[in-house]
Image (cartoon, rainbow, N blue to C red):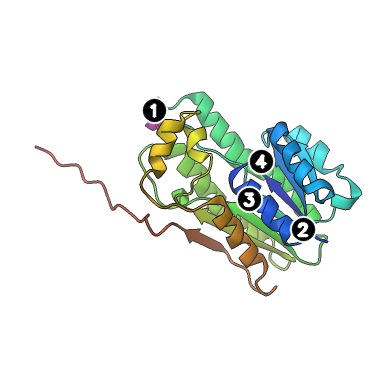
Amino acid sequence: MKTALITGASSGFGRASVEALINEGFKVIAIARREERLKLLKEKFKDKLHIIALDVRDKEKINSELKNLPKEFSDISLLINNAGLALNQDEFDSLSLEDIDTMVDTNIKGFLYIARVIIPILRKQKNAYIFNIGSVAATNPYFGGNVYCGTKAFVRQFSLALRNDLRSSNIKVTNIAPGLCKTEFSEVRFKGDKEKAEQIYKNTKFISADDIAKVIISIINLPEHININEIELMPVTQTWNGFHIEKFS
């Protein structure tokens, strides 16, 4: 039985991926900040799941926990590097330094801390896979996206460069770049303002976390000699809005 590690596993893409992979026959290590949610997952999946409550910004705890895994969960062959967030949608010079630090420290540094510890484990496996959860925001800037767009552009370019680093290895790398998905993403962005978050999805059709989990499973089940470098997906209701051109009176 193969083992997967998933960050941001208590909700959204991470939570859906936990269930999808267990149904696919994997054991799963679930990492998230919210211990109470992880405990509910543990109750559901029992010995198929190992939970670790930590913030991916905490590199010391990452090193300690992931270098001392239970033996039955130590043979990780799949990483879903998913933990990330957006905060507010302000113009850059109005964005708080705290929000800037949180996005950079989570979406970039925490992302790297996890990968740095797990890749040596993946190298030991016959076949291994890394899924990095990016965003269409990496290549499609939008008003108020500034720092978040920049962090996801980092994820995209790092994924491509990492694939180069891992050439001649047994490790495949895929950057998954979703568009409009309804998870807790907007609620987190607007700091618990559910009404404001709901307006993003009102009267439209969006991608779900389960849709992303299905994409991951479909890629895993491709022939072993195929590597999907990047997959960008949006709901049919979402497309590009063109350039903004300022008009003078």
Label 1 vs label 3: CA separation?
35 Å
- Mark 2: give few (<14), some (14-19) or many (20+) Cα within 10 Å: many
Q: Nearer the viewer, residue 49 or 62?
A: 49
User: Can residue 115 be seen here?
Assistant: no
Query: SS class of the residue under badge 2?
Result: loop
Q: CA distance from mark 1 to mark 2?
A: 45 Å
| Residue 155 falls within the magenta-colored stretch | no
Q: Three-letter amino acid code at disc 1?
A: Asp
Query: Whole-percent x and y of residue 191?
Result: 50, 28
Residue identifier under label 3: 16
Q: Earlier in the sequence, mark 2 or mark 4?
A: 4
Query: Is 60 placed left or right of 240 in the picture?
Result: right
Q: Dot 3, crowdedness within 10 Å: few (<14), some or many (≥20)?
A: some
The answer, for residue 93, to whether it is visible in the render is yes
Counting from the top left corner in percent of width and height, residue 142 is at 37, 44
Q: Residue at x 38, y 43 (%)?
A: 202
Horizontal side, residue 186 vs residue 168: left or right: left
Please count the marks in the image: 4
Q: Which residue is mark 1?
A: 93
Q: Amino acid at mark 4?
A: Ser
Q: Is residue 20 left or right of residue 191?
A: right
Coordinates of residue 34 in the picture (x, y in percent): 68, 33
Q: Earlier in the sequence, mark 4 or mark 1?
A: 4
Q: Residues within 10 Å of mark 4 (few under 14, many from 20)?
A: many
Q: What span is colored magenta in the figure? A: 89-94
The answer for how far apart the CA atoms under marks 3 and 4 are is: 9 Å
Q: Amino acid at mark 2?
A: Phe
